[in-house]
Image (spheres, rainbow, N blue to C red):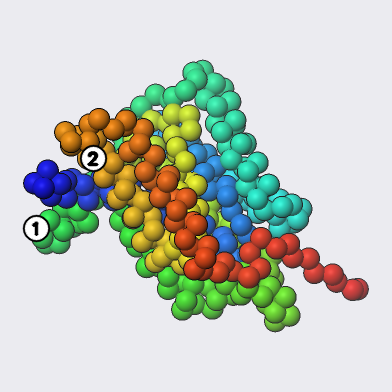
Amino acid sequence: MNEILSLFDTQLFTTTIDFSTPIVLAAIGGVLCERGGIVNIGLEGFMNFSAFFAVVGTIATGNPWIGLVSGVIAGMIFSLIHGFATIHLHLDHVVSGAVINILSAGLTQYLLLIIYHTAGQTASVPLSLHDMKYAIPILSSIPYVGEIFFNQTPIVYIMMISVVIFTIFLNRTKLGLHLKVSGEHPMALETLGISVFKMRYLGVILSGLLCGLAGSYLSIETGSSYSENMTSGRGFIALAAVIAGRWSPIGALVASVVFGFINALQYKLQIIPALKFFPTEIFSALPYILSILAIAFAVKKSRPPKASGEDFIVERID
């Protein structure tokens, strides 16, 4: 019993935040994209591409903040490929997202060879954002809670703020409401003279921006280099969080933190003597098993945006 209680210490919850942050950011990006009507299974590809260019920018300049901006811009540019394919070329959203993931994996491997003449991994960045941890005065001194939430790295704070900003954006601003209508009743929006195409591009670009933050977090905040496929399926877990969170930023946050907690807990479980006879692969699979169960449960309980994944074409008569 004491062994089990000892699992729930500050380190467990700090690690939960570490694991949750990229998933939360990518999941909110997925929410915005699908709320606008574009299904996005390319979150993994956006994150991977951004993680690479965050390192490229940091190594080139020696400044991790410029690296962060590079990662975010790369994510936004890469998202435009998905946007153009689905909005203007009217390609199937799932097929386009799958191609994005394949393209990201292949392109980053190629660029590794071209830029750094190596395969597998880049050199370490000279300075990472992890070295810039900020303790918020007074709040960080609160017992237990302060160490977990208020003594964090920059992108963790950005993640927390993003949840609030995009919740308000979707529910309290005219632009956010237009984005939601684009994914529910696009023809009604077009009838009002508001471009559905523009709203859907907005959702896709915001998705790329947030995935840019998520990818940068992996490579230059918790890590110090880029390695091939370092996202390790987090984009797909984020997609599961979108569905389990019922297409809302708050719901995506809760689902992502649950996934992050299970991921952090599985490392703790492996050191309990009574559980050592179980193969470590069982514990490693827990987050992915949870993702499948969450989707299976959420599909029965929630409804996606009505026009999400549907092609939209306006026939104009001159």
For the residue pair 312 and 156, the one nearer the viewer reads as 312
Whole-percent x, y for residue 98 in the image: 63, 43
Say above or below: 318 vs 47.
below
**Alpha-carbon neighbours of circle 2 within 10 Å: few (<14), some, or many (≥20)?**
some
Q: Position of residue 239 (x, y in %)?
A: 50, 53
Quadrant of the snapshot with the C terminus? bottom right
**Camera-nearest label, 1 or 2:** 2
Q: Residue at x 57, y 56 (%)?
A: 205
User: Nearest the camera: 21 or 72?
Assistant: 21
In this rendering, position of residue 286 left or right of residue 114? left
Earlier sequence position, callout 1 versus callout 2: 1
Tag 1 secondary structure: loop
Instruction: Name the amino acid type tagged 2.
Output: Leu
- CA distance separating discs 1 and 2: 25 Å
Q: At 47% across and 76% down in the image, what residue appears? A: 171
Identified at 9% across, 58% down, the residue is 143
Where in the figure is residue 218, as x and y percent of width and height? 38, 40
Query: Which residue is label 1 attached to?
Result: 143
Give whichever of 81, 13 is nearer the camera: 13
Residue 235 is left or right of residue 305, and the answer is left
Residue behind mark 2 = 269
Can you name the residue that lies furthest to the top here?
117
Residue drawn at (62%, 47%), measured in percent from left and top? 97
Residue 298 location in percent, x, y?
48, 62
The residue carrying pointer 1 sits among few (fewer than 14), some (14 to 19) or many (20 or more) residues within 10 Å by Cα, namely: few
Residue 37: quadrant of the picture: bottom right
Q: Tell which residue pokes out farthest to the right in this image.
A: 318
Residue 78 visible in image:
yes
Q: Is residue 261 above or below residue 53?
A: below
Disc 1 marks which amino acid?
A: Pro
71 over 312 or under it: above or below? above
